[in-house]
Amino acid sequence: MSDGPISTSPYLPQKGAGALLSVRGLSVEFGTQNGPFKAVKDVSFDVEPGKTLAIVGESGSGKSVTSLAIMRLTDYTGGRIVGGEILFRPAAGEAIDLARASDDRLRQIRGKDIAMIFQEPMTSLNPVFTIGNQIAETLMLHEGLGARQALSRARDLLQKVRLPDAERLLERYPHQLSGGMRQRVMIAMALACRPKLLIADEPTTALDVTIQAQILNIVRDLQSEMGTSVIFITHDMGVVAEMADDVVVMWKGEKVEQAPVREIFAAPKHPYTRALLSAVPRLGSLTGQSLPKRTPVTVIENGEPKLVGETREQDTARYDKPLLQVENLTTRFDVGKTFFGRVTHRVHAVEEVSFDIYPGETLALVGESGSGKSTIGRTLQQLVEPTGGTVRFAGRDMAAMSSSDRRKLRQEIQYIFQDPFASLDPRHTVGYSIAEPIVVHDLIQGRASIDRRVHELLEQVGLKPEHAKRYPHEFSGGQRQRVCIARALASDPKLIIADESVSALDVSIQAQIVNLLMELQEKRHLSYLFITHDMAVVEKISHRVAVMYLGQIVEIGTRQAVFENPQHSYTRKLLSAVPIADPQRERAKTRIDGEIPSPVRAVGQEPAIHRMREVEPGHWVAIESEPLQGAA
Amino acid sequence: MAGFILKRLLQAIFVILAVTLIVSFAIRLSGDPAIMLTGAGSVTEKDLENIRQALGLNRPFLVQYLEFLSGIARGDFGRSFMGGTPVSLLISKALPSTLLLAFASLAVSIAISVPLGVYAAVKRGKWPDQVIRVLSLVGLSFPNFWLAIMMVLFFSITLGLLPPSGMEGPESFIMPALTMAIILTATNVRLVRTSMLETLSQQYIMVARSKGLRDRVVLYKHALRNSAIPLVTYIGLQFGSLIGGIVIVERVFNWPGMGTLAFDAISARDYPVLQGSITVLALFIVLINLVVDIAYGLIDPRIRTE
């Protein structure tokens, strides 16, 4: 174990002499039941002072392990650095090989010279300690401050990350803060000792897009103020384009390409990088076109790029008689009760929402957390009872239906959830799961015919009939989502509610699933209610778009109208917050502020219902009497 | 919070009612105190009848029960059938010894099981973890009366180091408290281990490590408090079985506590003493669980605000 300056490195004379961090030939191994597994193989890169290096890749690419290995946090996850050097130069001349540094030396560097922000702001902060305590802890440890001094520094830091009311925030606990606020606290904590290097592992992936824009902004501002170098781990090419100076692309544990950000986007060299970029949905790619469009996706097969799919306009919607009519739908939940069981507060999840879906049409329901979009989906699937309003399916009022008709309706409206793993029973074969709706609704009789149908369905979603005998854990995330789609198709539905169904998937998989959904729509004349927060995917797949904010639709119209002529301030805010996968674009954008207000209200405090006006045929916008809270 | 405590106190009243009703009823099925008082033989049925009359035992059960309840409400537990000592006096002598023993056992158990459980969790799957898990299983497998007798035989009879029985001075606590603690520790170690493993996989632990905190701080400040909820819950539940188990240990070590008091009262069909001591013990168990519920809030701010 050698500490301190190293001059004998075989790599040193070549490159990275001025670099803050030089990772050379890094390999990380994990012990598994099937022997050692190499998660990172011979990876090298440099981080220059004050610059941002993005490490991009999909799940399993080794990007997160790399980020943990830099601070040797892999030691705590069962990982072992089996090769290479991690040379860190906090000051001129002196380089420390973190791969070989002692635990004591590492602890001095962690949190002081190198700090880290993690993906899940909801679980990054310790729930039992106050915000102030957690920030002050770092300062007391590394800067030797007393408790009072540390707390006052913590307050300054909270102000730096633009958190209002910093003084009171110090006393609060993490659960009292929203995800965006917690991630800002996390940034304040990471930057407390003005580290030379900040490692951010997917820091905005779990956040709403307007909150993401705020966080990226803060990171960028503080970086230029403090001269911090940043390693930004992400799968989102839009974020890369907005943040990075240099990009390292990782694939299956290896670095496949490294280049300045403009070069990566303009002239990707490695086939994997090309595939990755071709799959990225780009906001604005359908500007000027009225119909959604399927485009081929590049996938890597046996190391070779291959173009899958066709270019085809999605002219499937038939606008004569609506399939689903939702009128003044309201769904509220009681929360907060007094000692005697009287309701004091309600979640106004959905308020007076009206829309239609036509046969063969995809209506996208977009909005951020708490907007009520998922509640609408669950209400239509009869998982939640509406508080008011009418829902008509094929002209028939759902409330007036008999229980057997309602059961029949469940067969015609199917649901695809966000998490394909959680929505499949791990103890049953996927064949069983797909056959279940057929058996439940008694659609086909006889084992052999059911099996034949399951095989057919598997082929339709791009899997093989023999997959029916396998269990969910034997599939990748994308394949599992295909299984879920097959199951949704099993009862031959007319409407599929897809609730964030592609949000958790890697982009190349996501692009393929979107194509599959569109292909199935054309073949089977399906209608989709596509619930998502991802505007770029919405642009690709939907005929019409409804934008939701705090339980109400604030804008609805054709995709082209809403995207190219957004009228409501919230729609505009949402569109401007989406990171664009194009580094040539101007980065300085309008600053977005504010949190999304809570839909929880005291009993008797009913929200005002927006009135809508028609700005062009079929394009309705809520009248904004006063600026929305939180919308700039 | 006040509403919550009020709810719990109402609950406690029902618990006490149920416990006293069952205890009072069951003991009356089991034999005649008059016979126990006089010893079999040289008394006439008339004498027995007089004794029953004097003790108020020939009134209907419900009347006796209600009288007992109204007595409790006034803080009067009645007098022992054996010698007429006020039950409250007997309890006030026995209760402290039992509580001292119970808390001493718990304290010893926590002092052993927390570091061992944390260590086992940190060394998950490695040999220290295996050893600790096997030892805890061994500890769990010993019946406490056997352990108690073996300790007396070894430490008191063979080595003559410790007093074999009674409660005199701090050294008399060692064996009874250890006997109880060993059994408790066996389960507590496993509980701490499992709970810590869960907490250590949380992201905020990685965050704490990324701040450069020492392992000790990460484990005992950041992780332990988050792991404490299941442990505190279990200790609350344990208290009930601890009280049950203490009867046996008190017998073996001739400990002048509630266990001994209740045991003797059963043997003598001494209704007031039995009813009184069981009621007080039940009250304590309810109280401990109330304290546990309040402790949740102190440990975890998320519970506090609900």
Image (tube, rainbow, N blue to C red):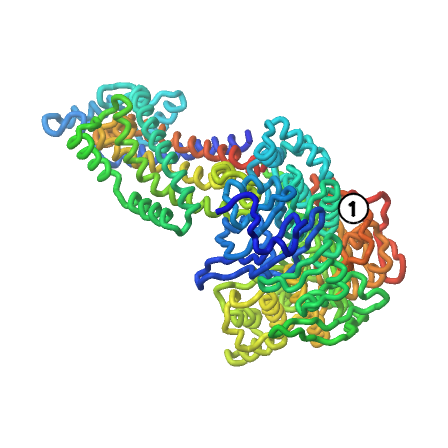
Instruction: Specify the quadrant of the image occupied by residue A226.
Output: top right
* Placement of A491 over or under A205, stated as above or below: below
Residue bearing the label numbered 1: A592
Tally the marks. Answer: 1
State whether residue A292 appears in this view.
yes
* Placement of B280 over or under A437, stated as above or below: above
Find residue B25 and report its horizontal and vertical position in percent. Answer: 31, 35
Foreground: A358 or A132? A132
Foreground: A502 or A247? A247
Find residue B223 and report its horizontal and vertical position in percent. Answer: 50, 41
Find residue B208 and report its horizontal and vertical position in percent. Answer: 55, 41
Amino acid at the residue labelled 1: Ile
Residue in the image at 43% along x and 46% along y: B121
Residue in the image at 59% along x and 63% along y: A254
Residue in the image at 48% along x and 35% along y: B293
**Local secondary structure at mark 1:** loop
State whether residue A354 appears in this view.
no
* Placement of A570 over or under B169, stated as above or below: below
Foreground: B229 or A276? A276
For the C terminus of chain A, give its image quadrant.
top right
Q: Is residue B193 left or right of residue A386?
A: left
Q: Which chain carries label 1?
A: A
